[in-house]
Amino acid sequence: MKRFFILGVFFSCLPVFSGYGQLSLESCQKKAIENYPQIKQYGLIEQTREYNLSNANKGYLPQLSFSAQATYQSDVTEIPIQLPNLNIKGLNKDQYKIAVELNQVIWDGGAIRSQKNNLQASSDVENKKLDVEMYELNDRVNQLYFGILLIDEQLKQNRLLQQELERNYKQIESYMINGIANQSDLDAVKVEQINARQRNTELQTGQDAYLRMLGAMIGENISDSKTLEKPTATLLSSNEIKRPELQLFEAQHTLLESQKKILSASNMPKLGLFIQGAYGNPGLDMLKNEFTPYYIAGVRLSWNFGTLYTKKNEKKISLAKTAALAAYAHGKAGEAAEEKSSASYVTASEIIRGLQSI
């Protein structure tokens, strides 16, 4: 960004061409973004977020499940007494059951809420990643745009140089007639003329390539007749650093925090209501050796302790990711601060180096 500020200062000091004014830097950036294939992902990310949040909200609705089982057991319950003239049959060792169960969550330890926050944070991270891509896209547009303007100025300087060399050549020829100069002086000027013409060809070729690349990025055919506006130099009036990488870090940090809450919610007990209707043999009456329908309703408290085994390692992973993000953000903040501070103090040698580096 420092280089582009330098170029803006340089071009604001140059005389304005009468042909410029058809394409501005802002319009090129806007067209490049509109022509960028990844721009459609913004809408896709938003749709995905809405669908995922809608699915997460359905976790509060009653959940219906169906199950069927057939079992064979080695032993069954028997009555250990025998009465005369009374035959009490035992249960069959093969048993069958078909059930439909309806569950309603009362309290899930914040699992659904944490999941919704995580989905929102994930969507924000994807959006910020696209923002970084758009920022880099604008950076490439800036390089091409200022590169074309720079080469245009260099071509003007080259034409002035060729005119000056042509005058020198004629002047030395007249000196040779009068015996003041010799052939070696004339040959030296001729070499400079050849170098200037070669440099002109190189600059023209480079500018044509830049025009083709910029045209491909904005989706238009930019010919020699279509000129570019020279942007005016503007100094940043705020000390606030606005880099999409830093916003991406904040979104990733929020995502990590939401993942921690999901981890904590998974270790909490869950309370809910349930009602089950079933048909099987045996039913609730264990003395009846026949297929009968029945139902059960009540309150259920469940607590999964299996996640406690991995909780320690998952916390270590989360801490490592947080430390890596903090280091990344610190580095990006330093780069942005350096760009901002250097944008206000530019030397002449830095301007020249910035122009020559494109």
Image: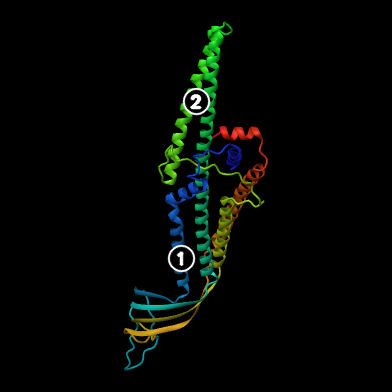
Q: Kindly tell me whether residue 313 is visible in this rendering.
A: no
In the picture of the structure, the residue carrying the numbered disc 2 is 199
SS category of the residue bearing label 2: helix
Judge left or right: residue 253 versus residue 63. Answer: right
**Residue drawn 58% across and 60% down?**
257
Looking at this rendering, what residue extends furthest in the bottom direction? 85
As displayed, is residue 1 above or below residue 325?
above
Amino acid type, callout 2: Arg
Give percent across and percent down for residue 176. Answer: 54, 8
Identify the image quadrant of residue 114: bottom right
Query: Looking at the rendered structure, which numbered label has been put on residue 50?
Result: 1
**Residue drawn 54% across and 14% down?**
188
- Point out the image quarter for the N terminus: top right
As displayed, is residue 176 above or below residue 243?
above
Give percent across and percent down for residue 302. Answer: 51, 73
Give percent across and percent down for residue 87. Answer: 32, 90
As displayed, is residue 151 above or below residue 35?
above
**Residue drawn 53% across and 15% down?**
170
Amino acid type, callout 1: Glu
Looking at this rendering, what residue extends furthest in the top direction? 179
SS category of the residue bearing label 1: helix
Compare residues 230 and 175 and report the one nearer the observer: 175
Q: Which of pointers 1 and 2 indicates the residue nearer the eye?
A: 2
